[in-house]
């Protein structure tokens, strides 16, 4: 679907991982997959999206686990929401090259408190 800019699947009981085919929709500006039952490693989910969802990506209120990927391929991303998943580990400077990031929500994960709802 060339030209598709927004997908909102908020609260649709989606299960499993993010299909690789979503990475083919690189005209997307906003992708909202929040409040579902999506699971698996967040690093794999991000990789499957291949840098699409250029402005806003919502993966919050799912069942993603693992560590925050050390490389987030979303250089134009303004908002990233991964709240209330099962993420853990240490936060490092994953977003240092992302000058457009305005909202980064980690609330409800297992990161140190200082990184909950980080707003650069």
Image (spheres, grey):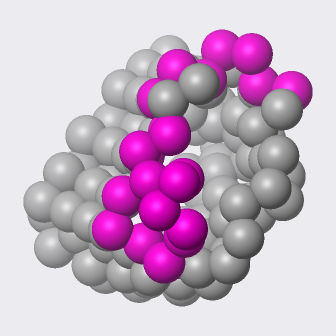
Residue 80 appears at what percent x and percent y? 50, 40
- Main SS, magenta residues: loop
On screen, residue 36 versus residue 52, left or right, reads left
Residue 4 vertical placement versus 84 (above, below): above
**Name of the residue lying farthest toward the front:** 114
Residue 115 vertical placement versus 77 (above, below): below
On screen, residue 28 versus residue 66, left or right, reads left
Name the residue located 59 percent from the left edge and 79 percent from the top edge.
88
- Examine the rendering and report whether any part of residue 85 can be seen: yes
Name the residue located 33 percent from the left edge and 68 percent from the top edge.
108
Name the residue located 71 percent from the left edge and 60 percent from the top edge.
91
Name the residue located 44 percent from the left edge and 53 percent from the top edge.
116
Residue 114 vertical placement versus 86 (above, below): above
Reply yes or no: does residue 101 show up in magenta. Answer: yes
On screen, residue 80 versus residue 8, left or right, reads right
Residue 95 appears at what percent x and percent y? 76, 37
Reply yes or no: does residue 64 show up in magenta. Answer: no
- Examine the rendering and report whether any part of residue 82 can be seen: no
Look at the image and tell me in which quarter the C terminus lies.
top right
* Magenta part of the chain: 97-118
């Amino acid at each position: 679907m060339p030209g598709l800019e927004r997908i909102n699947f908020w609260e649709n009981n989606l299960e499993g991982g993010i299909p690789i085919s979503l990475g083919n929709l690189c005209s997307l500006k906003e992708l909202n997959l929040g409040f579902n039952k999506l699971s698996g490693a967040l690093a794999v989910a991000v990789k499957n999206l291949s840098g699409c969802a250029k402005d806003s990506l919502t993966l919050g209120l799912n069942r993603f686990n693992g560590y925050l990927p050390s490389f987030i391929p979303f250089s134009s991303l303004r908002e990233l929401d991964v709240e209330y998943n099962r993420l853990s580990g240490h936060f490092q400077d994953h977003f240092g090259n992302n000058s457009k990031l305005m909202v980064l929500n980690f609330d409800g994960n297992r990161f140190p408190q200082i990184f909950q709802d980080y707003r650069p």
